Amino acid sequence: MTPELMIKACSFYTGHLVKTHFCTWRDVACTNENVALAEKMNRAVRCYNFRLQKSVFHHWHSYMEDQKEKLKNTLLRIQQIIYCHKLSIILTKWRNTARLKSKKKEDELILKHELQLKKWKNRLTLKRAAAEESNFPEQSSSEGSLVHETLKCDISLLPERAILQIFFYLSLKDVIICGQVNHAWMLMTQLNSLWNAIDFSTVKNVIPDKYILSTLQRWRLNVLHLNFRGCLLRPKTFRSVSHCRNLQELNVSDCPTFTDEAMRHISEGCPGVLYLNLSNTTITNRTMRLLPRHFHNLQNLSLAYCRRFTDKGLQYLNLGNGCHKLIYLDLSGCTQISVKGFRHIANSCTGITHLTINDMPTLTDNCVKALVEKCSRITSLVFTGAPHISDCTFKALSTCKLRKIRFEGNKRVTDASFKYIDKNYPNLSHIYMADCKGITDSSLRSLSPLRQLTVLNLANCVRIGDMGLKQFLDGPASIRIRELNLSNCVQLSDASVMKLSERCPNLNYLSLRNCDHLTAQGIGYIVNIFSLVSIDLSGTDISNEGLNVLSRHKKLKELSVSECYRITDVGIQITDSAMEMLSAKCHYLHILDISGCVLLTDQILEDLQIGCKQLRILKMQYCTNISKKAAQRMSSKVQQQEYNSNDPPRWFGYDREGNPLTELDNVTPSKGASELTVEKSTYSSEEQAA
């Protein structure tokens, strides 16, 4: 081997060794770098995840803090509601207790007053009989015995029909008192027909539960009508109604102790009920389930202000035979009913003709639409206190044949609604649209073709003027109109009254309250409305001359002129001569108030008895020259009388002799001042309406 080859071999071996170690080092170096890079990536991922978790936790923490705050506020609100509810319960109990005590005291006073009045009448009858005997001492013994027999007339000898007619005018309390007179009177009070209708509401604070139980047990087969309105009775007492198998009408409204359990007993025992009033009671869906199962002939149902049943309860009305004969339904104040509930009513009570929904702020157009889809027989509709009803409701009601409709205080009803009335309700007879600010003269023009219209109430419709009323009266609607209320229609003037006198031959009741554009000329036109019996001119510009003109009206029974500041003492001066003329001409006078007329004497009461035989209400406050004896004699001729002979109050401006007061000092009442108030009976429905 040569040195060159040796050098070459060593160089090759050295190069190969270096190459081998370099590759190994390179591989090791690359492996360490990848491990470091992976470690860095892992650290970066952990850092990123930590920051992400920190951000999410921060948002979660804020959310939880908000939730805690809301929960805290909710708990505070619930505590306040519970506290208010407890206060409401306490206040309600206190109010009911106070009302019961007040009513009990009032009933005791009324009973005491009635007993005193009966004693006075008996004494008066005996005095008159004694006076007649003293005036005719020469009468024979036979005539004296005849008078004696006449005074001792025994009504028990009358036919049963006549006895019933007499006792029908008495209340339950009076019937009970009559039954305690003697045996004959007790037999008269036990006639079967007399107990067909029992009204316990008039004696709810006097008669105990045990008497009601015994009464129902005794007359269970005769009772047809029961009224427990406002009675606070035990559940056992209500359950005893189930013994009255022939019951047709039941009124348990405002009875706080009436429950579903009591209704279950009644429904099982009285299947013939036609009229059922459950208003303002605590009934629930359990009672709603009982109605269609047992009361197959139910016609009238009132659920007013019953807020514990739900839409599901209304769905029960379609179970079994259902309530398909229902014609009258009152849902006033049932704010829990939704559109779904009205749809259930439409499915089960398709024969409804009279519908009343008052005090229902949740009532909407959709509710009415859902109802009238299948209830097309509705003829009478009352919506007072439903501010969300609009013209769409009238459009939905176009499928019904309405005759009476009543809205009050609605701002969404406009003239468009009256266009639907004109086209779809030709038989409409009663319209009440009081306090509807969206009604204008255009609405009256739409009503003019209604030939059956008899009652129109547009009080507080301030946008109505002479032109609209003229267009209304030019149509056939004016011929049959009987009642017209235009109170606070401030744009009306004498032209409207003149048109009324020309076109309304049957108008009986007219209200022009606060129509301050009326003058003496317009008052003169009122006299030409010969059929008028009642008119309200309060707040108008009527003067003494206007009163003089109105005095020529021969049929006027009621006149209201309060807040008419142009009427002076001259216009209302009244003496005996004036009352004599009043008695001679106003034969149909029903109500007379002569309070403060200090110049009147006892003579005017005799004149009234002769001329005003239909007088029912007489007020004689501060009539110093009318004696108590004369007032007592007059009390037997009227239904209600108020009398006292005290001096007039200082603000009257004159003394007991009619002289003006110079100094507003205390007027000392006279020693002989007396007071008498007599009320014999309530008024008829027509008088209440007037």
Image (tube, helix red, strand yellow):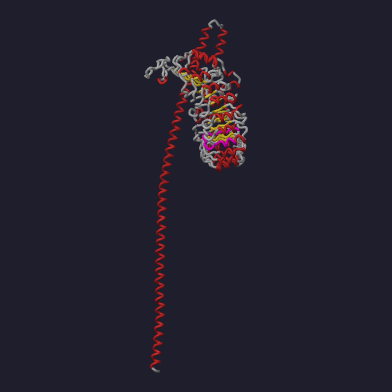
Q: Which residues are magenta?
A: 403-419
Left or right of residue 33: residue 263: right
Residue 131 image position (x, y, % from top left): 51, 9
Q: Residue 311 location in percent, x, y?
A: 55, 42
Q: Quarter of the image containing the N terminus? A: bottom left
Q: Nearer the viewer, residue 466 or 683?
A: 466
Where 152 falls versus 381 (above or below)? Answer: above
How far from the left and from the top, in percent, is residue 673?
42, 16
Look at 49% across and 35% down and name the residue there. Answer: 256
Specify whether residue 541 is painted magenta: no
Instruction: Tell whether position 410 is magenta.
Output: yes
Q: Nearer the viewer, residue 552 or 264?
A: 552
Which quarter of the picture shows residue 419?
top right
The answer to which quarter of the image holds residue 653 is top left
Q: Nearer the viewer, residue 124 or 425?
A: 425
Q: Front-most of 6 and 72?
A: 6
In-image side of 320 versus 30 (left or right): right
Could you tell me if residue 383 is visible in this image? yes
Measured along the vertical axis of the image, is residue 610 above or below residue 260? above
